Image (tube, grey):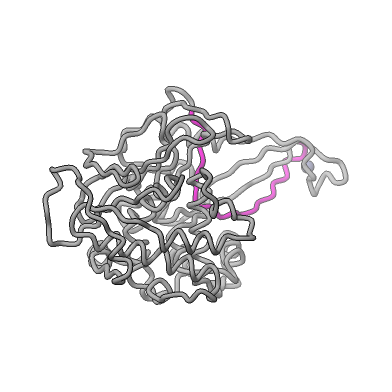
Amino acid sequence: MSEEIYDLTNYDDDVASMTEDEIMDAVADAESEAESESELEAEPQDETMANSQQKRGICGLFNMGNTCYANAAIQMLRAIPEFSAFCNSHPAALATAAADAPKAARILSAYADLSRTMWSATNPVSCRPAAYINVIRDVVRDTPYDQFGTRMPNDAHEYLTYLLDQFNEAIKGPGPAAAAEASPAIKAWCSIWAKEYSELINLFFGLERIVCKCMTCGNESERFEVFNTLKVNPEPGVPLEELLGRDREPESLEGYACEKCAPVHQPAEIRRTIWHLPPVLFVAVRRFNGDGRSKNHAAVHYAGTDLSLERFFDGGSTDSSKERIYEPIAVVDHHGSGFGGHYTAQAYNIVEKRWHFYDDDGIQNIEKPMFGGPTYIICFRGKTPA
Ligand SMILES: [Zn+2]
């Protein structure tokens, strides 16, 4: 039997299993509503971006009042070809959600409509995302996420995470069942997603194994957790891959409630290893401390080259995602101080096969993505389907 998390999918048209050509076709298939089309405003842009009749999706976003965090997060999401294909093809994303529809359905519908509008642009333009922003402001009212409805600056990674949760919430259903003889990893994955599974889980979530070892008796206990972001602490002069390694070094724990040593609590060591990686993975740089006001400006050293995460995998995992090679497809940058500051995005356009820099409604061609002090979130995409 299979021990591959990827093989648990039961979706015939799962975006994570589409070929590169199918994804390209689905992205280029963007049809926007007439209402949204009027939100596209031609902007004088870089003259090197020649006119075209083809849908190219080079589209900036006007700032709607401190919405640069949202604009940068949207440019990152939109650069994920599988997700843009999803927005152009999934029935829930194509549906127009009424004002009394569930909140998550409204967010997905509004975002997908914005994504289609942006991808339908034939020439470099910018879009006024008023309809989308209005839905967000309406939906988050009186919820723990009401900060996204204010005109205050917000955190782009928190926003991105919120959107992904809502998108899954809108389409979730029962997850795959683990066979009786399945490994603990597969059983954990199926249990975690038992009631809230969707093809987006397949696209965005990985699984890690956490082993806690009692330093007194040597007893080990394991558990599994899901994640969609790997986090790193920026340190001067340390390459990105090394930062990822440092974040996975064993940690000491005092007062561990070891089963064997009970009731005495003992010192223990915690090790985290990767069991499964998704086709699309976020890496976030811990820039802000608890109060959100001070910021670590240390540069991220990364040339944008192929990234393998195989060395962080658990020795027991036979998941084929272990061999996957990742490349960056979008970067969210944060400029300035901790409180306030400004967000921009660098995004790879799958149709144009080139990178663009987005500063709200400002758009520039760039040769390749730049990494450094402003680097905040990097979106990686697997180069070949694993
Ligand atoms: Zn013990």
Kindly tell me whether residue 162 is visible in this rendering.
Answer: yes
The residue positioned farthest toward the right in the image shown: 263
- For the image, the number of numbered tags is 0
Give x and y (percent) for residue 200: 45, 64
Task: Tell me which residue sits at (15%, 47%) in the image.
Answer: 49
Seen at 45% across and 30% down, the residue is 336
Above or below, comparing residue 354 to residue 38 in the picture: above
- Magenta span covers which residues? 216-234
Comparing 378 with 357, the one in front is 357
- Image-based side of 135 in relation to 222, left or right: left
Q: Quadrant of residue 145?
A: bottom right
Residue name at image x 48 percent, y 54 percent: 276
Expressed as whole percent of the image width and height from the top left, the position of residue 242 reads 45, 31
- Where ligand 1 lies, by image quadrant? top right
Front residue of 137/257: it is 137
> Residue 266 in the image: x percent, y percent?
80, 38
Residue placed at 32% from the left, 48% from the top?
329
Q: Main secondary structure of the magenta part?
A: strand
- Residue 237 counted in the magenta span: no
Is 218 magenta? The answer is: yes
301 above or below 106?
A: above
Give residue 243's position: percent from left, percent from top: 47, 32
In-image side of 96 versus 225 (left or right)? left
